[in-house]
Each structure stands twice: as structure tokens, then as C-alpha cells.
Image (cartoon, rainbow, N blue to C red):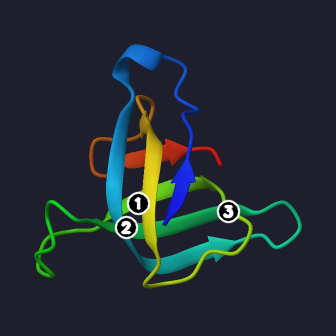
Amino acid sequence: MKNLENVNNNPHKSETLIGMIEDIIYHNEENGYTVFKMRPEDNPDPLSEAITCTGYLADPAAGESISALGGFCAKCTVWQAVFNFKK
């Protein structure tokens, strides 16, 4: 399981998401910037919406377990929550 540290500007609003990488949306091999969908382990229902996560991963893979420490983007639009993390 990969562990990722906080990049949220407000450490008091940090939280940890634990789950599985469901789908890699984008991965930049040069700098590791990655956008992926994550299925939290506390909500494994396949009919629920996965969480979009952004940050830096060297070698992400669908199906991989992950523990991400960070926070939800306060500047994101209402229609989509984005969880930001840093390796």
C-alpha cells in the first residue's frame, strides 16, 4: 500500500483516504503528476461515485491499494470533489 502525505494548505482539515485506485485518468511519466479515481474502502459500493484524486505518483496502477493523506480542494467546483495529495 502506498502512503502519501498532506499537501493541503490547512493542516487542520487534513484527512486520510484509504482505498483502491480504480482508474488512472492521466499520468505524466516525466514528473509523476497523476489524476486517478479512487474507491474508498469505507464505501466499496460499485454504484457509488469514485473520488477523483490528484498528486504525484511514480508508478500508479489500477487495483493498487493506497493510503492518501491530504484534503479536498476548496477551490473546486460544486459538481466535483477533488482530493489533493503529495507523495
Q: Is residue 5 above or below residue 49?
A: above
Callout in the foreground (1, 3): 3
Q: Which residue is drawn at 77% across and 70% down?
A: 28
Residues 56 and 79: in front is 56
Q: Position of residue 24 (x, y in %)?
A: 54, 78
Answer few, some or many: residues within 10 Å of disc 1's Cα (few below 14, many 20 plus, some between 14 and 19).
many
Q: Residue at x 43, y 55 (%)?
A: 67
Q: Does the image show residue 81?
A: no
Answer few, some or many: residues within 10 Å of disc 2's Cα (few below 14, many 20 plus, some between 14 and 19).
many
Q: Position of residue 73 (x, y in %)?
A: 43, 36
Q: Position of residue 42 (x, y in %)?
A: 15, 60
- Considering the numbered disc 1 on the image, is that residue within a helix, a strand or a loop? strand
Q: Which of marks 1 and 3 is nearer the N terminus?
A: 1
- Considering the numbered disc 2 on the image, is that residue within a helix, a strand or a loop? strand
**Residue pointed to by mark 2:** 38
Identified by mark 3, the residue type is: Leu
Q: Which residue is drawn at 65% across and 49% down?
A: 87
> In the image, 32: left or right of 56?
right
Q: Do the residues labelled 1 and 2 touch (CB within 8 Å)?
A: yes
**Residue pointed to by mark 3:** 57
Identified by mark 2, the residue type is: Met
> In the image, 41: left or right of 68?
left
Q: In this view, does 13 lie above or below 75?
A: above
- For this orientation, the residue located farthest to the front is 1
Q: Position of residue 75 (x, y in %)?
A: 45, 31
Q: In which quarter of the image is residue 15?
A: top left
> In the image, 29: left or right of 73?
right
Q: Quadrant of residue 50?
A: bottom left
